[in-house]
Amino acid sequence: MARYTCSFTVTVDVDSLRQLLVEVLQSCNLDIIYDTGDYMMAREQPGQVSFSKLVTVEVLIDKTTATETATRLNLVIKNEELPLQVDNHCHQIFELVNQAIIENRHWQFVEV
C-alpha cells in the first residue's frame, strides 16, 4: 500500500479554509466523498487507472491549534498500489496535490 503524508500551516481563517480545500482537491480531479468540517476525504475519479491505483486523500484540519490567522493541515494520500517504483501513481497525485496547495493564491504558508 502506497502512503504519503505531509503537513502544512497556512494563513487563512478556518471558515474559509474548508471551501478553499474543496476547490483545491476538485482542481486535482478528486471528488469529495466525506466532510465533517475538520476532516475531509476525497477520492480520485475512476476510469483512468486500475482500481488498486485509485488514490484517496484524507485531510485533517487541526482546529485545536488553529488561530484566527493560521491553521495546520495534515494530509494522508494513499492507495492500494505497492510502491515498487519511486514515481508511482500515488506519488504523482501526492505531488499534484502538494503543488496545488502550495500554488493556491488564497493563502500563504507559515510552515511546511
Image (cartoon, rainbow, N blue to C red):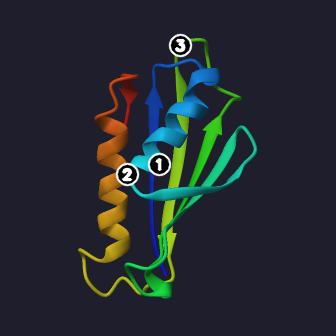
Query: Residue at the location (57% across, 32% down)?
Result: 19
Mark seen at residue 69: 3
Q: Quadrant of residue 24?
A: top left
Q: CA distance from mark 2 to mark 3?
A: 22 Å
Q: CA distance from mark 3 to mark 1?
A: 22 Å
Callout 3 environment at 10 Å: few (<14), some (14 to 19), or many (20+)? few
Q: CA distance from mark 1 to mark 2?
A: 7 Å
31 sits to left or right of 11: right
Query: Residue at the location (52% across, 20% down)?
Result: 70
102 sits to left or right of 67: left
Q: Tell me the amino acid under the disc marked 3.
A: Thr
Q: Tell me the amino acid under the disc marked 2.
A: Val
The residue labelled by disc 1 is: 25
Question: Reading the chain from its start, which is encountered first: label 1 or label 2?
Answer: 1
The x and y percentages for residue 43 are: 54, 64
- Label 1 secondary element: helix
- When the figure is inspected, residue 80 is found, relative to residue 17, above or below; the finding is below
Query: Residue at the location (37% across, 37% down)?
Result: 112
The residue labelled by disc 2 is: 97
- Label 2 secondary element: helix
Callout 2 environment at 10 Å: few (<14), some (14 to 19), or many (20+)? many
